[in-house]
Structures are given as structure tokens and as C-alpha cells.
Amino acid sequence: MSNAPLVDLSVHHKPVDFSDRIALGFTKMLRFCADTFFAKRYGHRAIVLETVAAVPGMVGATINHLKALRRMQDDKGWIRTLMEEAENERMHLMTFIEVAKPTLFERFVILAVQWVFYLAFFALYLISAKTAHRVVGYFEEEAVISYTHYLAEIDEGRSPNVPAPAIARHYWKLPDSATLRDVVLVVRADEAHHRDVNHGFANEIGGQPVDAAKIAPYPVHADELDIAA
Ligand SMILES: [Fe+2]
Ligand SMILES: [Fe+2]
């Protein structure tokens, strides 16, 4: 029933230089922390990690915006793409908050992590925008894997396949009969798109080839985010 674009689960950018290896190592370390902290609590995992996932797009957009102003040059559409990514990740958060409720401790973790991650990612982007986009590309590879595990949990009956929240049906233009499984499918397709876009940006900065035809298709989203509109 879902009209989510197909996702190529095998995509992995093989590290080609030191910056790529740093980005991959950092991502694997965070993956280990997330696996230890959340185990199979996928709803909670989604909420906490989406509060982090929505940061890089806004940081990248801000820094590219300031750069375009300083240098008085075109941004090649990067600013809008990154702002769209931030908005999309925020909608993931707004969706999963309807599915699971963060514990008090998780709310504290979100607060602490936001301080550290925002500042660290901002600094990283200033030092090496290529590494910053590579980090996001690897984060998104992991997000695709996590949402694939979440799908398996639903399919095998360990997570209830509840009706899709109204905000998700509106944002992804899903039918009234849509379920959590349909939502996870379109969220995973969003993550695959961000994965390929960010690896592409890192490649472009690093002078490596970019194959625009290989970017995973982006699901259809509502223009108006206000559900009451
Ligand atoms: Fe996300
Ligand atoms: Fe993401």
C-alpha cells in the first residue's frame, strides 16, 4: 500500500582519505553508543536521534548562507537543500513524538547532546565542510539501517503497527488507512535521500565524482507543514 520510493540498502561510501576515515570512525562510535543506550526501543531511539539529525542541515545552511553573503557568490542551491533537510528531520521528530514519549532522562540527554553536538558540528563545518557532510552521509547510512531494523520489529510483531499519526499522513500525503509501517518506509526513504545528497556534497567539495542520477528519490511531502492548514 505504501508508495514510498524504493531504497537501495547496500549504499556505502568506502572511505577514500583520512577525513572519510575520521567521519566513519566517529559515526561508528556514536552508533555503538546509540545501540547500547536504546537497544531495541526504536520509537525512543528515533525521537532522540532525530533531535540530533535535524541540526546539521541548519548549521550547513547557516554557514553556506554567510559564505554566500561574504563572497557575494551563488550557493548552487545548497542552502535550500540543507534547510529542507533540517525541516524534514524535524518532521520525523514531530511524527515519532506521536508514537513514543521520551522519558525524563531522555529529555535531559537531548538537552545535553544538543549543546555539545550543535557547537561541535558548527566547528567541524568551519574546519572541514567536506568531513561534516561525510559525517552526515554516514549518519544517514546508519539511519537507513536503523529504520530497516524498526520495520523488521513491526513485521515480526514486536512493535505494534499502530495507525499513522495525523501529522505524518498530512506531511507524506498518506491515505487515512496508513500505519506506522508506511511511515517508517517513507522516513527511511527520506534518510536514503539525505545520505546520497550529503555524500554527494562531500564528494563535490573533495573534487571526487558526483553521480546525481544515483541520488535516492525523495518521497512526496506536503508544502504546508501546519496540519490545520
Ligand atoms: Fe530522520
Ligand atoms: Fe536523517
Image: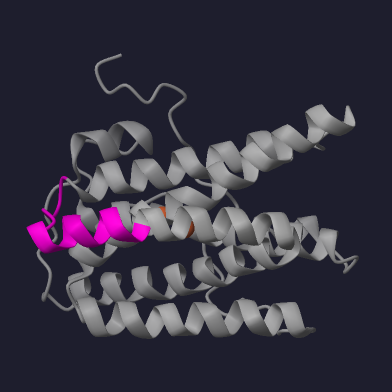
Q: Nearer the viewer, residue 99 or 8?
A: 99
Judged left or right of residue 114, residue 125 is: right
Q: Which x, y percent locates residue 172?
A: 38, 39
Q: Position of residue 223 (x, y in %)?
A: 47, 24
- Locate residue 43: give its quadrant: bottom left
Vertical comparison of 14 with 109: above or below: below
Judge whether 142 appears above or below 76 on screen: below
Q: Could you tell whether 140 is left or right of 90 in the image?
A: right
92 to 105, vertically: above or below = above
Quadrant holding the C terminus: top left
Residue 133, x across and y down, in percent: 66, 61
Q: Quadrant of residue 13?
A: bottom right
In depth, the one of 161 and 40 nearer the eye is 40
Query: Is residue 46 shown left or right of residue 99?
Result: right
Give the residues drawn in magenta, as a range: 98-113
Badge count: 0
In the rendered image, the vertical position of residue 71 relative to residue 54, given as above or below = above
User: Which residue is painted at 21% across and 54% down in the image?
Assistant: 180
The rendered magenta stretch, by its main secondary structure, is classed as helix
Q: Is residue 88 magenta?
A: no
Q: Residue visible at 28% across and 40% down?
A: 168
Whether residue 189 is visible to the viewer of this picture, yes or no, is: no
Q: Is residue 106 magenta?
A: yes
156 relative to 70 in the view: left or right: left
Find residue 191 and report its horizontal and vertical position in percent.
Answer: 49, 58
Residue drawn at x 35%, y 68% as measured from the top left = 147
Q: Of all residues shown, which one is farthest toward the top?
A: 229
Q: Residue at x 66, y 68 (%)?
A: 134
Residue 92 seen in the current view: yes
